[in-house]
Amino acid sequence: MNIWKFALRAFVLVAALWVGPAVLAQHGHIVQNMQDVKWGEAPPFLPPGAKLAVVKGNPSEKAPFTIRVMLPANYKIPAHSHPADEHVVVLSGALYLGMRDKLDPEGGTKLTVGGFAMAPAGKNHYAYTREETILLVYGTGPDDFRYVNPADDPRNAKKK
């Protein structure tokens, strides 16, 4: 690469960083560091204690979405499935994931930072943590949790 092409690319990068995230977002870009994440309570389909932040899209709409999920230590998500493929990347901590019809607290595969999992649409799986864990989850909505055992669904517990 000649010096002029290098200089032009460097200028574009510096200019992009200079204008800041707000201007980039107007053009479809999202630039976000972990310290800028605005966490909220997770929806009622997850057991209490999880936090969620939408990065892009809306998981309840028929479109691509990306979310961050913060799970506390010793958190359990019983066996469930989703209507579309679920993609998960571990950002911090560790996630234990199993592809069965019932949560097995000793049977999950440990995914560490940078680990990736994809649960196919309609396939039952479970997850748990032993330490606080932050995930990046993406897919195509509308997303939903379909628990294998209806008694495990936190939405049913609230009805009692």
Image: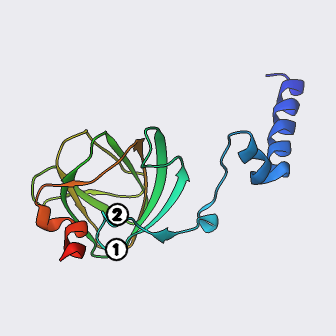
Q: CA distance from mark 1 to mark 2?
A: 7 Å
> Which of these two is toward me, 38 or 8?
38
Q: Position of residue 6 (x, y in %)?
A: 83, 30
Query: In the image, is 17 to the left or to the right of 150?
Result: right
Q: Given contact means CB atoms under 8 Å apart, are the residues at marks 1 and 2 in contact?
A: yes
Q: Position of residue 74 (x, y in %)?
A: 27, 75
Q: What amino acid is labelled 1 in the image?
A: Glu
Instruction: Report crowding for label 2: few under 14, some 14 to 19, many 20 or more residues within 10 A (C-alpha).
Output: many
Q: Quadrant of residue 126?
A: bottom left
Query: In the image, is 13 to the left or to the right of 153?
Result: right
x 25%, y 67%: residue: 155
Q: Position of residue 156 (x, y in %)?
A: 20, 68
Q: Is residue 82 visible?
A: yes
Instruction: Report crowding for label 1: few under 14, some 14 to 19, many 20 or more residues within 10 A (C-alpha).
Output: some
Above or below, 99 against 112 in this view is above
Residue lying furthest front in this view?
Answer: 159
Q: Earlier in the sequence, mark 1 or mark 2?
A: 2
Q: Which residue is mark 2?
A: 94
Q: Quadrant of the C terminus?
A: bottom left
Q: What amino acid is labelled 2 in the image?
A: Ala
x 30%, y 63%: residue: 45
Q: Position of residue 10 (x, y in %)?
A: 83, 37
Q: Which residue is mark 1?
A: 131
Above or below, 2 against 112 in this view is above
